[in-house]
Image (cartoon, coloured by chain):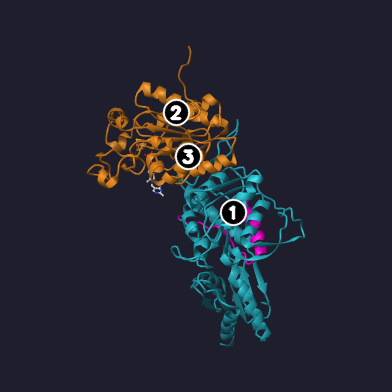
Chain colours: A cyan, B orange
Amino acid sequence: MEAGLSTKLFVKGNEAVAMASVEAGCRYYFGYPITPQSDIPEYLSRELPRLGGEFIQAESEIGAINMLLGASATGVRCMTSSSGPGISLKQEGISYMAGSELPGVIVDIMRQGPGLGGIDASQADYWQATRGGGHGGYRIIVLAPASVQEMYDLTMLAFDLSDIYRIPAMVLADSVIGQMKESLVANPRPVATLPAKDWAVRGRGEGQLQQVVKSLKLGDGEMEAHHWKMHARYQELADAECRWEELQTDDATLIVTAFGSVARIARTAVAMARAEGMQVGLLRPITLFPFPSKAYADLSTRCKRFLDIELSTGQMVDDVRLSVARDTEVDFYGRPPGAGSLPTPEELFEQIAKNYRR
Amino acid sequence: MKQVFSRPESLKDIQTHFCPGCHHGSVHRLAAEAMDEFGVRGETIGVASVGCSVFLYGYFDVDVIEAPHGRAPAVATGAKRARPDRIVFSYQGDGDLAAIGTAEIIHAANRGEDITVIFVNNTTYGMTGGQMAPTTMVGQKTSTSPYGRDHSKDGYPIRMAELLAQLEGVGFSARVAVNSPKNVMQAKKLMKTAFRYQVEKKGFAFIEVLAACPTNWGMNPLAANQRVGDEMVPYFPLGVYRNTANL
Ligand SMILES: Cc1ncc(C[n+]2csc(CCOP(=O)(O)OP(=O)(O)O)c2C)c(N)n1
Ligand code: SF4
């Protein structure tokens, strides 16, 4: 970036995503307006043409995800972004991309639902994001930033992981992170060893073999083999790419766990509890798929109490329960999405204290 | 002896799965001939749709991307924007293009994407067993219009070539048929024009081909071929509806 290495910028989370995509070498963006993510297409509609790239405001999110599919099939880095209602429309295309083993970055700045819902923060699309979302049985990479800096860093990571594993990658945040302004160090693109995209469709040239990008698998045993191959790849991803943050978990007898925006509020609440002498820690998953199950399994060998906090009636808590040691108690505190439903640090501190003293 | 007829290079030497008398084979051949004539086989990307032509990659000797049902124009848009030096075409049936994919085709056309769209209108959903399509003729019986298409409930068959010709972004829009030698010759010429538009970067090109689906029409190949001329052509007139570059 022009700003140079150590310069601190003051930008919105959504802008950080857009800036990171450019730094990651993405020159193709396809999207459709929806609050609270429109800063991303607005930024890229300005920047990409200057860089020799392409920005298309598609006719719908269905159009946009299929443009992503087509561009990705030719081997270029590309991105789309949206929020709840639009992400629902993209599911068909995401399923086809998963079936065709196509990389591509999808940014989801969650808003409330179901239906038209509202534009305030929500984490109620955790299931939709981490369970595949579309038909057929597949997973996508899901990264959950909790700061503007992470919006930037994890967007770049999403491009690399997606290219390496040939799985679509989603950056999953909410309107708090997307709309918040914070300082940002716009780091240069990290050096990664990326596999050659020798599967890409580019026109056969002369003498080269025909390339086909498809999800139709009708050969005897072909589909079954595909599912087992992807299953193994998801395992590989889980072994190598899980990321999480731990805070004061060493001596904790209660571990609070939360992702994204809520993890920030929980961090303050944990500090308040520590000030009161409570041995409380925080475990924040950064990759939601692969879910850092091992971190939960390891910590729960000694800490037997977890408190999961989400902006929903409880979705990630399923994964937490599946990950901890059997004799671990997992409690849940949720604020389902709704205007004014963002919890205060005091409110979360109260929940921590209640669970801690129980 | 002089060889006067052979398989186009852009088609593989392979038997197709098309039913006897199906016109998809003829349309494949015309498209392949056009690619051969421009010598673009090695730089072409085909976008297959969902329908009886889904096995495009099995028959055309070019790189292929398979699109979700109706989305081929959006997939082709993404591919062409990423590789503007390539020839990108989509090949779609009438259910695919004129029902589920209406938004994608209209907006790709309206943006004037530099792609070629081949539209096979056989008045029915072939692959799924002959259900009513947006192009089904009024009164035509299909598996989901057993009493015949009733325009008061089902609307009228859509004339896509004329509809798209209204859009400023469209360079070329034409309708052809392959039911007679004369029509095949004209179809061959206009198919070539539809590719020439892209080769010469003159804008979006659309070619609709009236086609027989003997299997789902419940007709033998000859009767089905006859129907194209007798019933379809009067409602779907052949001709060039837009040709902005006069190619
Ligand atoms: C989203 C979705 N809906 C429905 C289908 C089922 N389907 C497959 S092919 C097809 C219609 C094909 O008809 P057409 O486009 O006219 O092509 P033809 O087979 O006649 O060449 C349908 C409805 C599908 N594959 N995907
Ligand atoms: S069902 Fe109809 S369109 Fe499909 S291959 Fe047979 S004749 Fe052709």
Q: In which quarter of the image is residue A199?
A: top right
How far from the left and from the top, in percent, is residue A13? 63, 62
Residue at mark 2: B29
- The chain carrying label 1 is A
* N-terminal label among 3 and 2: 2
Magenta stretch in the rendered image: A135-164
Point out the residue furthest to the bottom here: A357
- Neighbours of disc 2 within 10 Å: few (<14), some (14-19), many (20+): many
- The chain carrying label 2 is B
Q: Residue B109 carries which label?
A: 3
Q: Nearer the viewer, residue B242 or B42?
A: B242
Q: Is mark 1 on a helix, strand or loop?
A: helix
- Judge whether residue A302 can be spotted in this image: no
Tell me what residue is drawn at x 52 percent, y 67 percent: A120
> Does A342 appear in magenta?
no
- The chain carrying label 3 is B
Viewer-nearest of discs 3 and 2: 3
**Distance of mark 3 from mark 1, alpha carbons?**
24 Å
Residue at mark 1: A42
Point out the residue furthest to the left here: B147
Viewer-nearest of discs 1 and 2: 1
Q: Which amino acid does label 3 sit on?
A: Ala
- Judge whether residue B136 can be spotted in this image: yes
Residue A223 left/right relative to B160: right
